[in-house]
Image: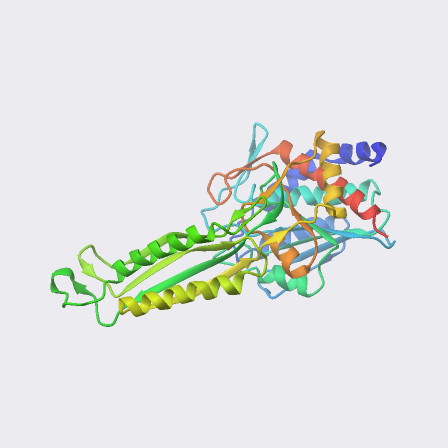
């Protein structure tokens, strides 16, 4: 990468402009399914900067997505910066900046990251760095589960709003994830006939849904032990996890229903149908043995497993940019969560890298991100785009 261009791009990053954008986005509450106002605000910011903005509904007319482009007019690769504008459903915390830290709802997940890539787009325009191909930014609602189902991202991909590579500024900045597990979120209901009854009035032989639930958890634990043999580099093994069990209305009542919720994760892409069938067979066997109805009532798949091509142009451009900004390439590892990058990889068929600020407090009331991290991300994104786009034929 040309040293003169590196210096030109990195020096052009404007801290005040970036933070003004971040605060402007954070100050509007945007819980999932209600991100319309902040999407409008982002569109206004981009229009004021002179960018042409598109507002595709993308299966969610309540909050049309935001799309903006920086085009060179010459053939080449298009790099996409993508982010979600919605936040988890927690009480709103207003933005503030203290001692070099940005606080507020969405500051780490991920309005701070979106502000960083908006700043990168401005820098690329101001420095006239994109001479081939182009850069596209997309921002949308419907990301955070269980309220959203990612329909807007999937609609954008389906409607052709997808580049030749993608960057997503989730709060993961100390490792570059090159592999990730697929995941399903499941809910299982165990039911018996009859009505709730006081524990001392139970008729003989009445099925105990709580006991069946406990047995199911033990069988899922045994399944997890068997699945641990299915391993892959970086990401570990297949797994089953139970995080919630709910039953009954009072301590001495024999209830009619028990609900168990958890996750099933897998390391090999395409494993979801087999994983679901395996679980359904386990439930069917337990139902016969226990005299209850044991049903898989929810099975939601946020994303499939993936592996990044470490020989891809995007990977090389990113590592070169990271080294130019920090002096080091980033160590590779696993993506610990499911994010929209899984959708780009599995549905869109393009390489996508998750990299954002080293921020803390995501999904809590205490989100915070160092301003220095936002500046670093803006520089890395701008330099990645410069290298990635100019390398395209």
Position in image of residue 94 (x %, y %):
52, 41
Q: Residue at x 74, y 36 (%)?
A: 13
Residue that sits furthest to the bottom in the current view:
193
Is residue 59 shown above or below 15? Answer: below
Classify residue 93 as left or right of residue 256: right
Q: Nearer the viewer, residue 230 or 99?
A: 230
Classify residue 175 as left or right of residue 323: left
Q: Quarter of the image containing the N terminus?
A: top right
Counting every numbered tag in the picture gives 0
Q: Residue at x 14, y 65 (%)?
A: 202
Q: Quadrant of residue 24?
A: top right
Residue that sits furthest to the left in the current view:
200
Q: Nearer the viewer, residue 320 or 30?
A: 320
Asked if one can make out residue 242 in the rendered structure from this viewpoint, the answer is: yes
Q: How is the image coloured?
A: rainbow
Q: Nearer the viewer, residue 267 or 349?
A: 267
Position in image of residue 289 (x %, y %):
29, 67
Asked if one can make out residue 297 in the rendered structure from this viewpoint, the answer is: no
Classify residue 132 as left or right of residue 236: right
Position in image of residue 136 (x %, y %):
74, 53
Residue that sits furthest to the top in the current view:
99
Position in image of residue 140 (x %, y %):
62, 56
Q: Nearer the viewer, residue 271 or 109?
A: 271
């Amino acid at each position: 990468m040309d040293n003169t261009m590196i210096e030109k791009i990195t020096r052009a990053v404007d801290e005040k402009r970036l933070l003004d954008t971040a605060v402007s986005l954070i100050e509007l509450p945007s819980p999932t399914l209600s991100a319309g106002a902040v999407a409008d605000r982002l569109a206004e910011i981009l229009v004021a900067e002179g960018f042409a903005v598109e507002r595709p509904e993308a299966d969610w007319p309540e909050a049309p997505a935001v799309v903006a482009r920086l085009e060179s007019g010459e053939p080449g690769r298009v790099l996409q910066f993508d982010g979600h504008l919605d936040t988890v459903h927690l009480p709103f915390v207003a933005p503030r900046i203290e001692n070099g830290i940005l606080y507020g709802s969405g500051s780490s997940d991920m309005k701070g990251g979106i502000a960083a890539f908006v700043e990168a787009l401005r820098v690329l325009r101001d420095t006239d760095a994109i001479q081939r191909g182009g850069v596209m930014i997309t921002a949308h609602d419907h990301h955070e589960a269980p309220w959203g189902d990612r329909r807007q991202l999937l609609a954008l991909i389906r409607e052709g709003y997808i580049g030749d590579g993608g960057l997503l500024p989730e709060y993961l900045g100390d490792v570059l994830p090159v592999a990730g597990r697929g995941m399903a979120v499941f809910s299982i209901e165990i039911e018996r006939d009859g009505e709730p009854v006081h524990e001392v009035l139970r008729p003989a032989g009445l099925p105990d849904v709580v006991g069946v639930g406990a047995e199911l958890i033990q069988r899922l634990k045994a399944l997890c032990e068997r699945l641990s043999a299915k391993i892959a580099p970086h990401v570990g093994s297949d797994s089953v996890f139970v995080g919630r069990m709910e039953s009954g209305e009072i301590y001495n009542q024999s209830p009619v229903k028990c609900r168990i919720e958890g996750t099933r994760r897998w390391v090999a892409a395409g494993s979801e149908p087999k994983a679901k069938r395996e679980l359904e067979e386990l439930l069917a066997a337990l139902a016969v043995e226990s005299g209850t109805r044991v049903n898989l009532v929810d099975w939601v798949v946020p994303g499939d497993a993936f592996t990044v091509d470490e020989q891809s142009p995007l990977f090389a451009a990113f590592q070169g940019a990271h080294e130019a900004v920090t002096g080091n390439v980033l160590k590779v590892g696993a993506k610990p969560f499911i994010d929209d990058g899984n959708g780009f990889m599995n549905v869109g068929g393009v390489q996508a890298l998750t990299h954002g600020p080293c921020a803390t407090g995501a999904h809590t009331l205490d989100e915070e991100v160092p301003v220095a991290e936002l500046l670093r991300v803006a520089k890395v994104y701008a330099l990645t785009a410069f290298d990635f786009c100019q390398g395209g034929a």
